[in-house]
Amino acid sequence: MKKYLLLLGFGLPLLGEAVDPPPVTRPRQTSGDTAVQPAWEESLTVTVGPTGADVMGSDQRAIQAAVDHVARLGGGTVRLLAGTYRLRNAVRLQSGVSLVGSGEDTRLIKEPSVSSPLAVDSDWYDQEITLQQPGGFRLGDGVCLRVKESKTGREIVIKRTLVARSGNRFKLDRPLRENVWQMNNATVSTLFPLVSGEEIADLRIEHLTLDGNREQNAELDGNYAGCIFLQDCNRVAIRHIRALNNHGDGISWQICHDVTVEDSVSEGHSGLGLHPGSGSQRTVIRRNVLRNNQIGLFFCWGVKNGLAENNLIEGNRVGISIGHRDTDNLITGNTIKGSREQGVLFRPERGPDFAGHRNQIIGNTFTDNGPEGGAVIDIQGGTESITLRDNTFVDTRGGLSRQAVKAGPGTKQITVEHNHLEGVQP
């Protein structure tokens, strides 16, 4: 025999079988180990506020100074005291640094945006721009440069900071790395996320009110911004956040793994309430309110093995949208109500290879979703292996012209069972 018991009768594994390592019961802080650490009773905390704080101020400069200081010392917490903080650039988070406010009394609001066309072309190797209308732009501002290539129609979006100035010429913090030409209608606007992080890990964002000031700002979509915007991040906890009134998305995270969003509100955005973005794995979205957005919860491309549980998703154009290779997600215990179009939409894609398969919609309540003649759950394209079980569909608006579940051409293995219907057709 190739396999044999090492000690007969002691239940030890056969030779060659996989064995789990022993659990860590006495952790020590070891150089480079961020996965297992002691539960320290105290950690470094730096306060920021208009008065009576370690760092005094009420804009992004004071907050950023505290974040950078705590990061340099190895991590900890930046605690924002009650007050209104007016931002002209994003607060850029760093690994191991948590940003914690004092609840609704800690309010970060985006200043009104200004825009200008370019006065001079800038090439991809340049690190400066020249504006036709420089009034309203200040050093330290976060800016967004946008240009549409005339040949391909591709929109190029570049986020930078203004760091030096001579008249209407501004130096950028980093080179452009794209051609920004007048012939392609290049513009510059003071647009940015309020709180942002790129290529960082192990942080918390908690107890803050973030106001995007939608009425006084131009639009910047959730692939680049939001009240919170994260790119290529790991192990992030977002809790007790009020993300309000952004001309774009509320909270967006792109290619981010093990992100948890809990007990938060995201409402009044021109874009998406929550946007787990391309490639994001193992997202947990729990006990949130997503209200009055274009789409409440938008699964982007390749969002997999996520959980959306016990959320209130209300008054959006579409409640939940699932599409391009968004597979193996569980949506359970949610209340989806008042969606003007679908409560849940499985988007049409480029065929079965691109669709959102093996998702489960279990134990949710759907109330007054969809227009006359529409469907509460609309499964389009080549979507396969969807389970719809133990859901409640209610419509109090009268008539029976709304369908609970519609499975379009090309869909397969759609399991619909043990659902309860009131005022809605099967």
Image (tube, rainbow, N blue to C red):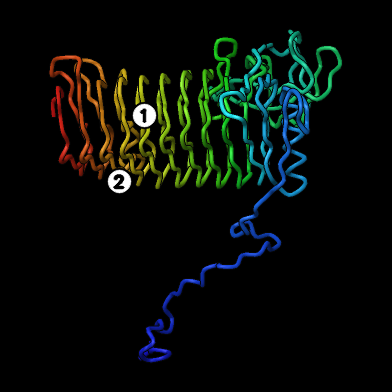
Give the x, y percent position of residue 147. Answer: 62, 20
* Vertical order, 104 against 330 (above or below): above
Q: Please tell me how many numbered marks the rendered image carries.
A: 2
Give the x, y percent position of residue 198. Answer: 63, 39
Determine the residue positioned at 16% across, 41% down: 417
Can you say which quadrant of the picture contains the C terminus? top left
Amino acid type shown at disc 1: Leu
- Report helix, strand or loop for mark 1: strand
Determine the residue positioned at 53% across, 22% down: 153
Mark positioned earlier in the residue sequence (1 or 2):
1
Determine the residue positioned at 66% across, 37% down: 93
Q: Are marks 1 and 2 in contact (CB under 8 Å)?
A: no
Task: State whether residue 52 appears in this view.
Answer: yes
Give the x, y percent position of residue 46. Answer: 73, 38
Amino acid type shown at disc 2: Arg
Label at residue 358: 2
Crowd band around label 1 with a 10 angstrom C-alpha radius: few (<14), some (14–19), many (20+)? many
Label at residue 312: 1
Quarter residue 215 falls in: top right
Q: Nearer the viewer, mark 1 or mark 2?
A: 1
Does residue 313 appear left or right of residue 426 in this picture? right
Front one among 242 and 250: 242
